[in-house]
Image (spheres, rainbow, N blue to C red):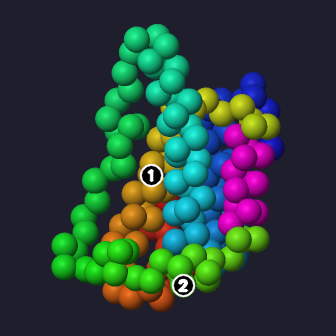
């Protein structure tokens, strides 16, 4: 675990490597990764927005909003899937482990919120792209895939 005194880039790389390794090792479905990511994006973004409001400042749009993705407009939407069955198929233990991994690294290495949120937005963009390609509920449970350079 990198110490808070190490460069931010090294701490972010440690977070990235551990997240990729865990998700790959457990063939974690893209929907589960997305749910964990959304939790941390919401928590960090709320803190940043509150701090910005206190200082009468604003945050850049690339932090506040999800990044645009290329998607198929004819693909089925999540609303067309039976949500109760989807949620019942989640592996909450696996999601809790990823959650704990992220939280532990963020807390122990004291990563600043802005670069962390940027990293999580990159993950979110990748996950949303994969989710947008789902043609059926089963595709939502396909393992998260990473490009070579990720």
Left/right of residue 51 with respect to residue 134 in the rendered view: right
Task: Say which of 101 and 147 sits in front.
Answer: 101
Magenta part, dominant SS: helix
Left/right of residue 131 with respect to residue 26 in the rendered view: left
Residue in view at x 70 percent, y 40 percent: 106
Q: Residue furthest front?
A: 84
In percent of width and height, residue 18 lies at 69, 57
State the extent of the magenta-drawn residues as a range: 95-106
Q: Quarter of the image holding residue 28?
A: bottom right
Residue 122 is labelled as 1
Q: Residue furthest left?
A: 74
At label 2, counting other C-alpha atoms closer than 10 Å, the crowd grade (few under 14, some 14-19, many 20 or more) is: few
Q: Where is mark 2, residue-wise?
A: 85
At label 1, counting other C-alpha atoms closer than 10 Å, the crowd grade (few under 14, some 14-19, many 20 or more) is: some
Q: Is residue 116 visible?
A: no
Q: Quarter of the image holding residue 88?
A: bottom right
In percent of width and height, residue 7 lies at 66, 29
SS at badge 2: helix
Residue in view at x 24 percent, y 64 percent: 70
Please say whether residue 105 is one of the residues in the magenta stretch.
yes
């Amino acid at each position: 675990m990198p110490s808070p005194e190490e460069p931010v880039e090294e701490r972010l790389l440690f977070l990235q490597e551990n997240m990729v390794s865990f998700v790959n090792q457990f063939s974690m479905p893209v929907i589960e990764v997305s749910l964990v990511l959304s939790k941390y994006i919401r928590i960090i973004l709320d803190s940043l927005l509150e701090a910005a409001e206190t200082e009468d400042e604003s945050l850049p749009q690339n932090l506040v909003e999800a990044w645009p993705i290329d998607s198929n407009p004819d693909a089925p939407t999540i609303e067309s899937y039976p949500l109760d069955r989807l949620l019942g198929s989640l592996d909450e233990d696996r999601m809790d482990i990823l959650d704990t991994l992220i939280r532990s690294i963020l807390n122990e290495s004291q990563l600043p919120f802005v670069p962390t949120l940027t990293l999580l937005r990159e993950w979110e963009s990748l996950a949303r792209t994969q989710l947008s390609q789902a043609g059926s509920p089963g595709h939502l449970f396909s393992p998260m895939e990473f490009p070579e350079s990720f």
